[in-house]
């Protein structure tokens, strides 16, 4: 790309000629306020809060859509620019419920920050307030259209990441809203609860359903024995919610904080990720050897499960029947743990901390009850919610000592933590499958690089001996549902000769999940991804089948992978979720 | 009888969609003609159009709600357009509107009577401010209304079935 020189506030930078002013300003280290603009979505130029003065141009320009050209001179901080931005925000606030003090996004709201930065002290326009219906009808996501500033980011995130079109602008003028078709609730349309719309919403118009209160209640109840599990991707992101930079590994501090919050046992979803690899790995081998449905597709991402159950029900036999790590862990907390510890089942309250909004909906799937009528997981909180709980409890997170998970359900390998990034489940599975087929020999180098990276769809092959023959196993890895759809269409058309496919609903995998701290963008995701691989490298054991506590669990209680007990507790089934729209 | 015409309408819709297949930017004309066929735009029709034109249903719904020419509910035989412009507003248009709604037995948010005799809409101004508060029923303008005078007038249209 050809470079052009642009001078912004007396600072000259060279930038690619297809940049817009806002991107050039970022290179120059100058921050321009933005609401409808998001670095990973199409640019709309709708909100006008990013206006700048451009020498020689008539009027002000919207920096997010204004293309740069060579020799351009831009001013981002003139009286006219400041006044105009202020007016734009004052107008947005005129019909906005001004309830920051009691709002879920308080202190983490882009609109609030911009209003504060611009020094808005009064709202000269008093507009009629909207009175639109709040959607609180599903377990994952709450929508309050009254807090919507019509920036359209959610529409684009759903469309451009997920290839779904849940939202659109409806009505016009003052009555304009962003709504699903027929103003249906999210649970009535083809929404997967992935939370990518939540992740980009600058206000509290789309939020995770807050479940922190019921977790606090359980913690305060002396009759409850409260167990917590933490998903792989939480440990590289929680710090962001508590003032630390993206990519900081806070595993030890998170464990310490959970103990201080009062959890009786602090366990790790990484343990059950190792267990997933055992069950799913053996299931894969079983399918290959016994002619089961191939390609087999991973089943850990609940956004993805919702998607296939709604959009490709004919392909459900391709899904691995292995439960997700959260669900496997939940099952253990309601069977293995009370049984072996002599704790009455009714006392156990099982919480999980997840990077994901769809995990809240996974929790209530009727298929996931090891004891009929009793959910295996009692509450799911997102990484963001854990951040809020830690603040609420007055815990000085940054200065906490590092503590270790409780044993035995807290012991895990490097293979488990990489579940948190796209390609990780595939890589973890290969580490184990390869060894099982090669008399315990490690896959060369342990790392399987072709599964790594942010490319939307990755393909690779591995040679393994099966029944004495050398078989080339074909793999594919996709993240985002848009890419998943491409692969599903291939399978439907009979054009996919893969054996094994990994799919994660969110960009980058769980590290980019809809429940992770905001803001999220390519840079933040890259930092979290690098941190996940650092955790993996630092582990002494990096293959699931070598986890001593997994081996012990099979020896002492479970039996063998795909055995009778596993079948009941660790495997599940899927069902079409028909949707009218 | 009703069955028969509905079947025919769907047949017409299919023909319409066939003729627009693969034509880009055809949503608005298709919606207009579909509304002519059905009298309004029922949900199923919108879903069908969305599938056939390969435009997301959320976007189809967005377009339908953007233009006031499109109707998501069946329309009554008589259309009442109650003026809520400034002049009418200050002279009690709201009370007149409430009286009509009560007379027609419309519940919250309902704009068409269950027997499909009347649809009531509010409009910003019908240009008869001298007659405020005023309204139009079909093509007739009625002015200087009161909550009391409006009910018998409505009844006339009831008896006067087209
Ligand atoms: S969405 Fe933001 S600006 Fe609106 S009330 Fe909540 S914190 Fe305040
Ligand atoms: S949760 Fe995901 S699928 Fe649902 S509306 Fe948001 S982005 Fe779309
Ligand atoms: S819901 Fe949020 S992201 Fe969507 S348009 Fe409104 S403010 Fe923007
Ligand atoms: S951020 Fe540029 S117009 Fe909204």
Image (cartoon, rainbow, N blue to C red):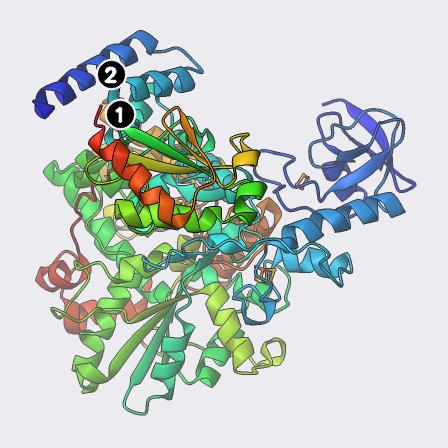
At 29% from the left edge and 50% from the top edge, which residue is drawn?
A: B107
Q: Nearer the viewer, residue B38 or A250?
A: B38
The residue under label 2 is B13
The residue under label 1 is B48
* Residue B110 x, y percent position in the rendering: 31, 45
Answer with the quarter of the image where residue A20 lies. top right
At 22% from the left edge and 58% from the top edge, which residue is drawn?
A: A365
At 72% from the left edge and 30% from the top edge, which residue is drawn?
A: A19
Label 2 resides on the chain identified as B
Q: Secondary structure at mark 2?
A: helix
Q: Are marks 1 and 2 on the same chain?
A: yes
| Labels 1 and 2: the sequence-earlier one | 2
Left or right position of A262 against A138: right
Q: Secondary structure at mark 1?
A: helix
Residue A578 seen in the figure: yes
Residue A78 seen in the figure: no
* Residue B108 x, y percent position in the rendering: 33, 51
Q: Nearer the viewer, residue A559 or A81?
A: A81
| Circles 1 and 2 in contact, beta carbons < 8 Å | yes
């Amino acid at each position: 790309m050809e470079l052009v020189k642009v001078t912004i506030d007396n600072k000259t930078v060279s930038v690619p000629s297809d940049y817009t002013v806002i991107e050039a300003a970022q290179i120059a280290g100058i921050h321009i306020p933005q609401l409808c603009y998001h670095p990973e979505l199409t640019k709309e130029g709708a909100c006008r809060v990013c206006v700048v003065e451009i020498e020689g141009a008539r009027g002000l320009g919207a920096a997010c859509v204004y293309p740069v050209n060579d020799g351009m001179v831009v001013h981002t901080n003139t009286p006219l620019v400041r006044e105009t931005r202020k007016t734009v925000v004052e107008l947005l606030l005129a019909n906005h419920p001004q309830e920051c003090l009691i709002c879920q996004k308080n202190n983490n709201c882009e609109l609030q920050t911009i209003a504060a930065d611009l020094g808005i002290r009064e709202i000269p326009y008093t507009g009629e307030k909207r009175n639109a219906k709040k959607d609180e009808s599903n377990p994952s996501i709450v929508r309050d259209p009254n807090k919507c500033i019509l920036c359209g980011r959610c529409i684009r995130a759903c469309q451009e990441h997920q290839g779904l079109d849940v939202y659109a602008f409806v009505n016009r003028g003052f009555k304009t809203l962003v709504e699903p078709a027929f103003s249906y609730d999210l649970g009535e349309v083809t929404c997967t609860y992935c939370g990518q719309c939540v992740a980009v919403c600058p206000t509290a118009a789309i939020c995770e359903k807050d479940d922190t209160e019921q977790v606090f209640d359980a913690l305060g109840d002396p009759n409850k024995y409260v167990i917590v599990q933490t998903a792989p991707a939480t440990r590289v992101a929680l710090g962001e919610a508590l003032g630390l930079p993206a990519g900081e590994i806070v595993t030890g501090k998170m464990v310490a904080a959970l103990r201080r919050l009062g959890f009786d046992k602090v366990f790790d979803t990484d343990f059950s990720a190792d267990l997933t690899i055992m069950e799913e790995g053996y299931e894969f081998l079983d399918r290959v050897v016994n002619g089961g449905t191939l390609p087999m597709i991973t089943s850990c991402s609940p956004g993805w499960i919702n998607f296939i159950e709604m959009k490709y029900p004919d392909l459900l036999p391709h899904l691995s029947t292995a439960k997700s790590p959260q669900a496997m862990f939940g099952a253990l907390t309601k069977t293995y743990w009370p049984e072996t510890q002599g704790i009455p089942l009714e006392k156990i309250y099982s919480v999980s901390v997840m990077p994901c909004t769809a995990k809240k909906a996974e929790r209530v799937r009727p298929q996931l009850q090891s004891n009929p009528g009793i959910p295996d997981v009692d509450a799911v909180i997102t990484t963001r919610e854990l951040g809020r709980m830690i603040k609420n409890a007055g815990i000085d997170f940054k200065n906490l000592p590092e503590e270790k998970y409780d044993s035995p359900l807290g012991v895990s390998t490097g293979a488990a933590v990489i579940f948190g990034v796209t390609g990780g489940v595939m890589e973890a599975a290969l580490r184990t499958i390869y060894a099982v087929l090669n008399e315990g020999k490690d896959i060369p180098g342990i790392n399987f690089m072709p599964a790594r990276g942010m490319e939307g769809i990755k393909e690779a092959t591995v040679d393994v001996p099966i029944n004495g023959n050398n078989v080339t196993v074909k793999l594919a890895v996709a993240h985002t549902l848009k890419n998943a759809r491409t692969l599903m269409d291939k399978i439907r058309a009979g054009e996919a000769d893969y054996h094994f496919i990994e799919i994660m609903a969110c960009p980058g995998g769980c590290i980019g999940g809809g429940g992770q701290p905001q803001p999220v963008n390519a840079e933040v995701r890259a930092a979290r991804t690098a941190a996940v691989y650092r955790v993996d490298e630092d582990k002494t054991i990096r293959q699931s089948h070598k986890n001593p506590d997994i081996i012990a669990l099979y020896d002492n209680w479970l039996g063998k992978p795909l055995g009778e007990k596993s079948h009941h507790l660790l495997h599940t089934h899927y069902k079409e979720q028909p949707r009218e729209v | 009888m009703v069955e028969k015409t509905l079947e025919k309408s769907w047949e017409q819709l299919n023909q319409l969609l066939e003729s627009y297949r693969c034509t880009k930017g055809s949503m608005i004309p298709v919606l207009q003609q579909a509304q002519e066929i059905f009298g309004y735009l029922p949900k199923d029709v919108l879903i069908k159009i969305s599938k056939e034109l390969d435009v997301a249903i959320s976007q189809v719904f967005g377009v339908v709600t953007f233009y006031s020419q499109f109707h998501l509910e069946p329309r009554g035989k008589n259309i009442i357009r109650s003026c809520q412009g400034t002049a009418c507003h200050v002279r009690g248009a709201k009370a007149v509107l409430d009286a009509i709604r009560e007379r027609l037995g419309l519940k919250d948010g309902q704009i068409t009577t269950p027997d499909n005799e009347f649809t009531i809409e509010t409009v910003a101004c019908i240009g008869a401010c001298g007659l405020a508060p005023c309204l139009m029923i079909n093509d007739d303008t009625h002015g200087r209304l009161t909550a009391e005078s409006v009910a018998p007038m409505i009844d006339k249209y009831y008896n006067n079935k087209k």
